[in-house]
């Protein structure tokens, strides 16, 4: 079967700046297109499919070349291998939303595994059927739990309340826990409501209270000017720890050092 390729935005080397693998050297493969609109999104350029993919020429330099889309799986896998400098490296499949391209993402994950690399899938956690198609080639699932106070679907009206994501997320998490290693990450803003965060904890506990939850304070970007204050963050941490066994408060560390 011919390789359909992937729509990619960029491939680059850095370190994992958020979640449970924070600090690990990583190669990031960023896919194009997303079906959500997060008010705090720091990569809105990934909302639509990309015409071309920029590929870092040397790890950590910030110097890029460019290849047209779609990018062949072998081309992407070899770029990742080169940027990993030949030693074990986590590969973050991120977006956009990678699960909008399940078959090529699965093929890429398999190619990376064959080259001795571990993969971490960063997903908004809404496409359970697509997860089923890729899960056996993925090592870790990093699932975002979106809050309706700050996230809309692409199809939602621009103003007014939107339906919560809890049901779809719970369904996705059940599938992810059957597949292997998974943790949940939720971005907290000044608009976050105590009740919606409590609902996140209740849903996770209903699936498995041992699933780790990462509370991630929003990083100021674009229209977002402030992060929640420390007192509120610590109160949320205490409340979540009362319901779940492993809850951690971890900001976006790559923003602190100015890395990609």
Image (tube, rainbow, N blue to C red):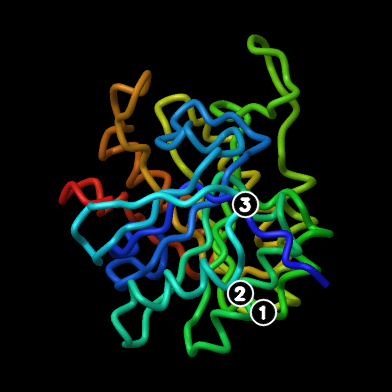
Q: Position of residue 40 (x, y in %)?
A: 44, 30
Q: Which mark is residue 137?
A: 1
Helix, strand or loop for disc 1: helix
Q: Which mark is residue 121?
A: none
Q: Are marks 2 and 1 in contact (CB under 8 Å)?
A: yes
Mark 2 and mark 1: Cα distance apart in space: 6 Å
Mark 2 and mark 3: Cα distance apart in space: 16 Å
Residue at screen point 79% across, 58% down: 128
Q: Position of residue 42 (x, y in %)?
A: 40, 35
Q: Are marks 3 and 1 in contact (CB under 8 Å)?
A: no
Q: Earlier in the sequence, mark 3 or mark 1?
A: 3
Tag nearer the camera, 2 or 1 = 2
Q: Position of residue 83 (x, y in %)?
A: 33, 72
For mark 3, what is the residue? 70
In the rendered image of this protein, does residue 89 appear above or below residue 205? below
Q: Earlier in the sequence, mark 2 or mark 3?
A: 3
Mark 3 and mark 1: Cα distance apart in space: 21 Å
Image quarter of the N terminus: bottom right
Tag nearer the camera, 2 or 3 = 3
């Amino acid at each position: 079967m011919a390789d359909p390729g992937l729509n990619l935005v960029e491939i680059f080397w850095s370190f994992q700046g958020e979640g449970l693998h924070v600090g690990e050297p990583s190669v990031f493969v960023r896919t194009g297109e997303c079906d959500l609109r997060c008010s705090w999104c720091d990569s809105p350029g990934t909302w639509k499919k990309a015409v071309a993919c920029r590929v870092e020429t040397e790890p950590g330099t910030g110097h890029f070349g460019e290849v047209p889309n779609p990018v062949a799986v072998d081309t992407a896998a070899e770029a990742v291998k080169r940027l990993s400098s030949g030693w074990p490296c986590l590969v973050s499949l991120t977006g956009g939303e990678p699960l909008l391209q399940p078959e090529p993402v699965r093929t890429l994950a398999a190619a990376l595994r064959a080259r001795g690399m571990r993969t971490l899938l960063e997903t908004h956690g809404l496409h359970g059927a697509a997860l089923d198609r890729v899960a056996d080639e993925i090592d870790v699932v990093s699932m975002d739990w979106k809050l309706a106070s700050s996230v809309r679907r692409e199809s939602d009206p621009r103003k007014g309340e939107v339906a919560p994501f809890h049901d779809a997320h719970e369904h996705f998490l059940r599938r992810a826990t059957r597949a292997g290693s998974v943790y949940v990450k939720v971005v907290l803003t000044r608009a976050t409501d105590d009740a919606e965060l409590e609902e996140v904890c209740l849903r996770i506990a209903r699936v498995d209270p041992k699933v780790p939850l990462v509370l991630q304070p929003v990083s100021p970007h674009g229209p977002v000017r402030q992060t929640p204050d420390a007192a509120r963050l610590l109160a949320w941490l205490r409340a979540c720890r009362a319901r779940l066994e492993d809850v951690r408060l971890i900001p976006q560390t790559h923003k602190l050092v100015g890395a990609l």
